[in-house]
Image (cartoon, coloured by chain):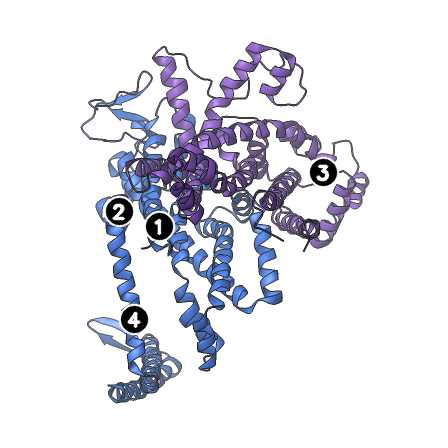
Amino acid sequence: MGLLMKLGGIVTVLFGIVFTLAGAYGLAGGTGITFTINERVVSAQEGGIVFLIVGIIMLLGGIAMTYVARAARLMPERPERGEWAARWADLKYTLHLLRKNPLVMAGSMIAIFFVALSLLANLIVDPNLAVPTGYPEFEHSYPFQRKFMWPKHSVINWGPGVRLYEGPEQFYLGTDNWGRDLLKMIILAIPVDVENAVIVTVLAATFGTLIGALAGYVGGVVEEAVLRITDIFFAFPALVLALVFAAMFGRTLPTLRLALLLVWWPPYVRLMRGQILSEKQKGYVEALRGLGAGHLRILFRHIIPNSIYPILVQATLDFGGVILTFSALMFLGFSPSPSLPELGNLAASGYEHIFEAPWLIIFPGLTMLIIALAFNLVGDGLRDVLDPKLRR
Amino acid sequence: MKIYEYVIRRLILMVFVLLGVSALVFYLARGFPTGIAPWAPYIHPKMTAEDIAEVKRIHGFDQPLHIQYFYWLRDILHGDWGRTGIWAQGRPANEVFLSHFPYTVELSVAAIILTVAIGLPLGIISALKNNKLPDHVSRIIALTGYSTPSYWFGFILQLVFFYYFTIWGLPHLPSSGASGMEGMVARVTGMPVLDGLLAGNLPYTIDALKHLILPAFSLAFLSLGFLARIVRASMLEVMRQDYITLARSKGLKERVVIYRHALKNALIPAVTLTGIFFAALLGGAMITEYVFAWPGVGQLSLRAVFQGDSNFLLVYTLVIAAVIVTANLVVDVAYVFLDPRIKY
């Protein structure tokens, strides 16, 4: 097995070298040379880039293969498999415990539904409907004449002062301030929020975990410095910092993400540091050191995997929080464009018209509540299940 | 380490944290030439170019940013926090802050009372009926609390208790502001409810309380979930201890075991958490104040952000940060008195 992998690795590396050289040659010397593939004119440089990328990937893959093969030969095979088998069994047991909790099951179903919806949203609803050009019958502008309208034959009666729509189209959740269908806008808004929350949570958790692990493992001055910096961030009301940051750096999605990131990373640092401190004193770390394992290996291969669960729980719980804070920023007016379908932004358009068009705030907010609640249910259940004291 | 040594160490650290906070906000708020120029409120149309240059020189606005920071530090140590823009009539920033701070304090106190009054029983019930129906119900209430967009909940309350109650002809609650009878009583503390009580003016107090209910509940609803979950967790932890088993085996009634033996120890984290909550509410009431047009500092800071008024933002963040850091310190010291096992 090990030998076969090593051979394969070497062959891949050789091919990788050939491809890289060919690509570099095409890129450097192929100026002005073109050839036709499937009736499409391709320059030699374009081909060179493709070859170069493929070659580099093959090189790296081959090197990784030989390395794995060497590691497989050097390390006794049994314990390695045993470890993964143990982790797998642990995971299965966790899932088994989770399955017994109806709230967690309901939460994860809803969460999966929304994640799936966010992946499919642009297929279900035409994203052009969010912008004026999506309405050809209104000569490339929003259908303003039907703004703030509620379907006439609806079950809900919002009381006096509400404009009713009697046209041929069916708006299940009414229309917004541009005359767009609110239900379709909510569907289009879900991917925006979910995508942002995923990016911010993953980056914050990764960054915070790495910094915290480093601080906890190295200790001394580094630890003190990192902790004092997180102190500064903990002394802020979270929203204020994000607001000031967003106000100063402009209203674009990357800025808003960065602003949220600035607020969400410090808790992970503290969490991870605490984990590392308790993990560092355990016997297996000393044993690893005795076996001659390097610091990086001990930290990344053993300590972090053993203390990752609280981080996962925190990230799941933060997911809802990030959505809420992000939409709050949007609601307060930090949206890059007023027509961007985003839950907080949709709610903001109803801010001045709360009594004449209450659905504009109610339904986007409700969507947010359901998404956040689903993730919080999962996170809360995970925390209970992963708590070693409550586990048995 | 003695307790006072610990406190002194923390106080010294606190100074550095506050310096860090102010430096960060200073850089963010002053480093970008948007909004109100910090010297603009000092200038009036009759000033000559030399006068303006003089103003800039005195306050160091002509220096590079990192040197400006030290000018600013010098100024605030002399009690000059700079002036706000037109939006607050160009009054000194600290004066504006102080005149509106009592409203925020009142709101936070009311919210924290509601949080404890609802969150505590919820947590205890949750722990005692662990993984049974009451636990699930209280878990849903708690989780809904912190999954709710704060502005959304505020609007729902306004919509139901103000708009629809008016339409249905029911006694309704006011939807915005801190008091409907401004100027009826002398302003002593700045908190409408307290002022009304001090003046002995009952209608005024009741009116102020009516204005307080919706924003306070809207704020409390977001934090009571946290409290309930913490109380539940610490209660579960305590109930597993040997001394509870001992108390039970002595034949004590379950009620006595829970309220006399378990609760006392389980409440320690809850008490300390309440302190941190209070500090967080002071700084986090921004959106609720915005929705309910509550005249507190949170709403003002929001306006300052949009106006780009660095002076007010600096006062706001610095005071709130000081409150939060102090609350953390008080909580840590309180631990020592509440739990004799902890030593520093």
Q: Magenta segment, which residues?
A: A101-115
**SS label for mark 1:** helix
Instruction: Tell me how many marks there are.
Output: 4
Occupied quadrant, residue B180: top right
Q: Distance between the residues labelled 3 and 4?
A: 62 Å
Instruction: Give the residue displayed 58% in from the left and 63% down from the top.
Output: A223
**SS label for mark 3:** loop
Occupied quadrant, residue A35: bottom left
Mark 2 chain: A
The residue tagged 4 is A84
Q: Is residue A220 left or right of residue B270?
A: right
Q: Which chain is purple?
A: B
Which is in the foreground here, disc 3 or disc 4?
4
The residue tagged 1 is A384
Circles 4 and 2, Cβ within 8 Å, touching? The answer is no
The residue tagged 2 is A101
Percent across and percent down for residue B149 are: 41, 37
B268, above or below A18, in the image = above
| Observer-nearest of B258 and A324 | B258
